[in-house]
Image: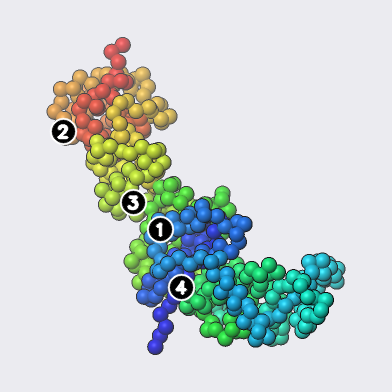
Amino acid sequence: MTQTPVLRFAPSPTGYLHIGGARTALFNWLYARHTGGVFRLRIEDTDRARSTPEAIAAILNGLKWLGLNWDGETIYQFARAERHREVALQLLTQGRAYRCFATPEELDAMRAEQRATGKPIRYDGRWRDREPGPAEAGKPFVVRLKARNEGETVVHDVIQGDVQFANDQLDDMILLRSDGTPTYMLAVVVDDYDMGITHVIRGDDHLNNAARQLQIIEAMGWPVPVYGHLPLIHGHDGAKLSKRHGALAVEAWRDMGYLPEAMRNYLLRLGWSHGNDEIIPTAQAIKWFNFENIGRSPARFDTKKLDSINAQYMRDMDNAELARLTGELHQRLRGQALDAVAMTRLMALMGGLKERAKTLVELMDAADFLYRDGVPAPDAAAEKLLTADARAVLRALLPLLETCPWHADQLESVVRQFADDRSLKLGKVAQPLRAALTGRAASPPIFDVLIVLGRDESLRRIGAYAPDN
């Protein structure tokens, strides 16, 4: 009988959930959903000095925003410390681990000698085959794994292929510190076993850890999970990803106006491909996802590509849903809810607004003229359009608009006839109108804007730039 795949995402809450972690979570989630398996979440909070409640909340909120729902309760590693100690003591009883009484000063001297003689810096096994005597009574010790020191450890990796590690380069790592606290390397293996994890898919900065963790698994006689180590994400210039490239908290991308479904699509394409497909909805991604199509080279983060994908998802989104999200973003970033009039206007012009925006923030800003009555402050581009000549055009046009039936086709007819009568190109009339009505040089079709704002509000705004003098 085939075992149900169980995958996990196991972030350390010493910082926010960034793009690399989000992609790792996504790949685990997709494979679990593709196979009808289980996706678990474990918070590896054993570093008590650096783990914070704020970071844990950011991880949970980031995953929820991305739509990566996990199965079962969230596991917190620190709460399982007693179980980790239990396994270390079991290995000690079985002779697969030992007590090391080497003092910090002795270890410093050992490393200094290794450096001086050009040897690798590693624990030399000085307590590996020694029994403590009366001199060690009551002294602090660590518990180390008695690792194999001959031959090779091979990590069978579904992404990287088989990776060999010489055992004489893998020293006897610490399982329990001198204060009795378990190390990360031990805790990870015990938690994966107890959670029934069948696939360990993570960044390739953990590849060396896999060789060491395999030795614990072997010593305990536990089943070996399927390993897959994802190449890291680099910036567009090939350098290690940093904040200047976009290594921001996932929640920051939310507040920059990106849609979660677009972010999932973009993260999927960072190192995974399906032919030339670029826009891959989540349902399709679940059907297609596999490990074979993950590349071995680092992916490059490209904000322009993310913008393009996000713009496509916005154009394809239902106008009412997009208006709702824009309203939520407005309240979150500006601390003010949009009233019913603003939402009605936003909905009416959404078709034209979303064609010009790459993010929700761009859309929200472009629709600013809809949120309240009153003459909008012109931006720099609109200010350039509102020249003395342009204001004279508006002053001449205003009486015709005041007597025109307020329907889009009739308004357009009046404006076009006005331009023809004065041998003006339509833009010479429409652009000043746009600047006066919206405070911007670009907007949805200007006759739609006139209808949505209504007669009184439109005439008031135009009149502000068409004084009698």
Colouring of the image: rainbow
- The quarter of the picture where the C terminus appears is top left
Question: Looking at the figure, which quarter contains the N terminus?
Answer: bottom left
User: Residue type at mark 2?
Assistant: His
Q: In the rendered view, would you say 300 is above or below 296?
A: above
Q: CA distance from mark 4 to mark 3?
A: 31 Å
Instruction: Provide the secondary structure element on which disc 1 rests.
Output: helix
CA distance separating discs 4 and 1: 17 Å
Tell me which residue sits at (33%, 39%) in the image.
337
- Verify CB contact (< 8 Å) between mark 2 and mark 1: no
Alpha-carbon span between mark 3 and mark 2: 29 Å
According to the picture, the residue beneath numbered tag 3 turns out to be: 314
Quadrant location of residue 391? Answer: top left
Which numbered disc flags the more N-terminal residue, 3 or 2? 3
Marks 4, 2: nearer the viewer: 4
Q: Is residue 262 visible?
A: no
> Circle 4 sits on which residue?
7
Mark-to-mark CA distance, 2 and 1: 45 Å
Lower sequence index among marks 4 and 2: 4
Residue under circle 1? 64
| Tag in front: 4 or 3 | 4
From this view, report whether residue 172 is shown above or below residue 72.
Answer: below
Instruction: From the image, state whether disc 3 or disc 2 is nearer to you.
Output: 3
Query: How far apart, in angstroms, are the residues tagged by discs 3 and 1?
Result: 20 Å
User: Label 1 is placed on what type of residue?
Assistant: Lys
Of labels 4 and 3, earlier in sequence is 4
Q: CA distance from mark 4 to mark 2?
A: 59 Å
